[in-house]
Amino acid sequence: MTKRLAASALGPRLEALRDRHRQLDALVHEEYRRPLPDLDRLRSLKRDRLRLKDALSELEGTMRTIARAPGQNH
């Protein structure tokens, strides 16, 4: 698999994760703006957001590794 092909395969997944992270971030902020925020919902949203952040970091690291890999320059 060439570097370009590998990166192009991961790109859409990365964007989907970033989009979902933004959505969760908006939901967290929306919950905080409520007069009586639901603390259980906030905890759940934040936990999901953190899991996504970890997945994003891992995928970005994989993409950096692919980009640095020697050889295949297609």
Image (spheres, grey):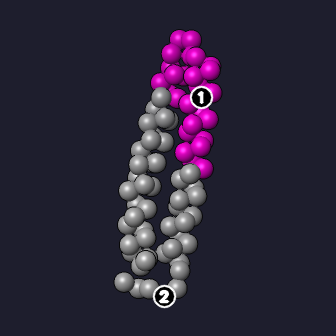
The structure residue drawn at horizontal position 42% and vertical position 68%, both measured from the top left corner, is: 7
Q: Position of residue 68 (x, y in %)?
A: 53, 78
The structure residue drawn at horizontal position 56% and vertical position 51%, both measured from the top left corner, is: 55
**Amino acid type assigned to the residue bearing label 1 in the image:** Ser
Residue 15 lies left or right of residue 25; in this view the side is left
> In this picture, is 6 found above or below 43?
below
- Residue occupied by mark 1: 44
Q: Is residue 50 magenta?
A: yes
Highlighted magenta segment, given as a residue range? 28-54
The structure residue drawn at horizontal position 49% and vertical position 75%, both measured from the top left corner, is: 67
Q: Nearer the viewer, residue 64 or 3?
A: 3
Task: Kindly report the secondary structure that dominates the magenta region of the rendered protein.
Answer: helix
> In this picture, is 32 found above or below 61?
above
Quarter in which the C terminus is drawn: bottom left
Q: Residues within 10 Å of mark 1 (few under 14, many from 20)?
A: few
Q: Nearer the viewer, residue 11 or 31?
A: 11
> In this picture, is 2 found above or below 60?
below
Which circle marks residue 71 in the picture? Answer: 2
Q: Position of residue 27 (x, y in %)?
A: 47, 29
**Amino acid type assigned to the residue bearing label 2 in the image:** Gly
